[in-house]
Image: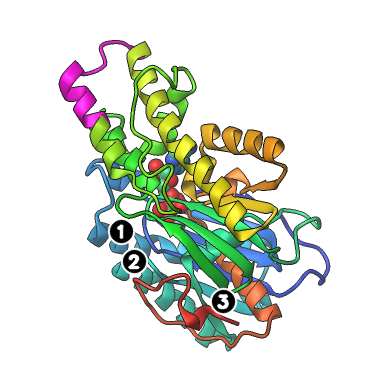
């Protein structure tokens, strides 16, 4: 379990919200005051699922149940906040694994009922969108500017035109594998363990991105993505040429794979930006931690003249601060509380509209 703490003085800065996130393989709890993060506790289940090469839903639910109470206690303790001082509870209501979501939603609803506080159900991807504007100090943003969000994670690859909180137009999405999923599958094939993103990212930094020619699927076509052909191309390369026989060859393969991913993502951001006319791009989600992607977007932003907001590294992966922050924004906008489980809710569902 990891955690960061900061005791918040004073009463300004928005509602004090406890967030609970349990949509996949991270049990997380956090306390925010507005968009200022007071504590952010994440209990990762990576070690449990790593031996299976991916997330096992049944095991995920069981471990959420074991960890959720302790995460909440730690989040309150590290924030220096009593449960009775909370203004609201926020839970991830979807999308995600239904059994996993049920644990967090039940815990949040139970606590909210005991404390007689409202419970807000938050869309997981709205949480990721809000993650880019979370802060640890009084400089934290107070609202969500209109922007283009590149949302890249293990389960999602989406380009979203955000015109305000709850106003999301999905411009493009993956037609097959999510980008993080492609990283995880390639890493599994190479025997690099789970999750694959961070390790491929590290090895790619030592390799040559032009060493192996790999496809840039749909790069000149529309705003949707396809990563399954790229993954297959890596498999075919390995069948033809055999396993990498040196660290150098492994690094070259990882760098070539990453170069293909990054080139497609940057190209689609450019097209979506021109189409939507926005001058700010936010990159969020687990894959937003990727060093190659961050560097390429920074370069592109400087060259093309747009403002890039790269999610702070500690909020890229799944966490509860983003869920609590989204609820704080919703409360400020006068949204009605209410939470349930919806494992496959879309980001542009009319119910998210304010
Ligand atoms: O947002 P997240 O924690 O969970 C989902 O909502 O899916 O994203 C997890 C994904 C995994 O596929 C993981 O391999 C990927 O993010 N990831 C990365 C990096 N760090 C995590 N992918 C590429 N480069 C990274 N540095
Ligand atoms: Zn996520």
Q: CA distance from mark 1 to mark 3?
A: 22 Å
**x 60%, y 69%: residue:** 326
**x 51%, y 86%: residue:** 338
- Tell me whether the residue at label 3 lies in contact with that at label 2, contact meaning CB atoms closer than 8 angstroms: no
Task: Check disc 2 and report its element: helix, strand or loop.
Answer: helix
Q: Residues within 10 Å of mark 2 (few under 14, many from 20)?
A: many
Q: Earlier in the sequence, mark 1 or mark 2?
A: 1
Q: CA distance from mark 3 to mark 2?
A: 18 Å
Q: Determine the quadrant in which ligand 1 lies.
A: top left
Q: Earlier in the sequence, mark 3 or mark 2?
A: 3
Please name the residue that numbered disc 2 is placed on.
100
Quadrant in which the C terminus is drawn: bottom right
Give the magenta-colored segment's residue range.
234-247
Please name the residue that numbered disc 1 is placed on.
60
Q: Position of residue 134 (x, y in %)?
A: 67, 57
Q: Position of residue 176 (x, y in %)?
A: 29, 52
Q: Quadrant of residue 97?
A: bottom left
- Front-lying residue, 188 or 159: 159
**Res. 321 visible in picture:** no
Q: Position of residue 4 (x, y in %)?
A: 62, 50
Please name the residue that numbered disc 3 is placed on.
89
Q: Earlier in the sequence, mark 1 or mark 3?
A: 1
**x 75%, y 58%: residue:** 140
Give the colour scheme shown: rainbow
Q: Residue furthest left?
A: 239
């Amino acid at each position: 379990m990891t955690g960061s703490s900061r005791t918040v003085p004073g009463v300004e800065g928005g509602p004090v919200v406890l967030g609970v996130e349990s949509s996949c393989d991270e049990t997380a709890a956090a306390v925010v005051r507005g968009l200022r993060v007071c504590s952010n506790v994440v209990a990762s289940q990576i070690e449990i699922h790593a031996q299976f090469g991916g997330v096992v839903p049944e095991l995920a639910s069981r471990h959420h149940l074991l960890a959720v109470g302790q995460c909440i206690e730690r989040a309150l303790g590290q924030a220096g906040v009593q449960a009775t001082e909370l203004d609201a509870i926020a839970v991830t209501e979807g999308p995600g694994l239904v059994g996993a979501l049920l644990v967090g939603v039940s815990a949040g609803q139970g606590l909210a009922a005991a404390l007689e506080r409202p419970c807000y159900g938050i869309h997981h991807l709205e949480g990721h969108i809000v993650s880019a504007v979370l802060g640890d100090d009084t400089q934290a943003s107070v609202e969500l500017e209109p922007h283009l969000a590149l949302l890249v994670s293990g389960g999602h690859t989406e380009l979203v035109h955000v015109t305000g909180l709850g106003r999301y137009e999905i411009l493009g999405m993956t037609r097959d594998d999510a980008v993080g999923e492609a990283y995880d599958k390639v890493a599994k094939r190479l025997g690099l363990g789970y999750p694959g993103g961070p390790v491929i990212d590290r090895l790619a930094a030592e390799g040559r991105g032009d060493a192996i020619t790999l496809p840039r699927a749909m790069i000149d076509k529309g705003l949707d993505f396809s990563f399954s052909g790229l993954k297959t191309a890596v498999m075919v390369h390995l069948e033809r040429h055999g396993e990498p026989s040196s660290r150098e060859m492994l690094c070259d393969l990882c760098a070539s794979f990453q170069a293909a991913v990054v080139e497609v993502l940057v190209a689609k951001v450019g097209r979506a930006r021109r189409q939507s006319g926005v001058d700010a791009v936010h990159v969020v989600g687990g894959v937003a931690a990727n060093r190659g992607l961050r560097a390429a977007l920074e370069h592109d932003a400087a060259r093309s003249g747009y403002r890039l907001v790269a999610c702070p590294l500690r909020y890229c992966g799944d966490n509860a601060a983003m869920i609590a922050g989204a609820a704080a924004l919703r409360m400020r906008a006068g949204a009605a509380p209410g939470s349930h489980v919806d494992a496959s809710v879309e980001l542009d569902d009319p119910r998210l509209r304010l």
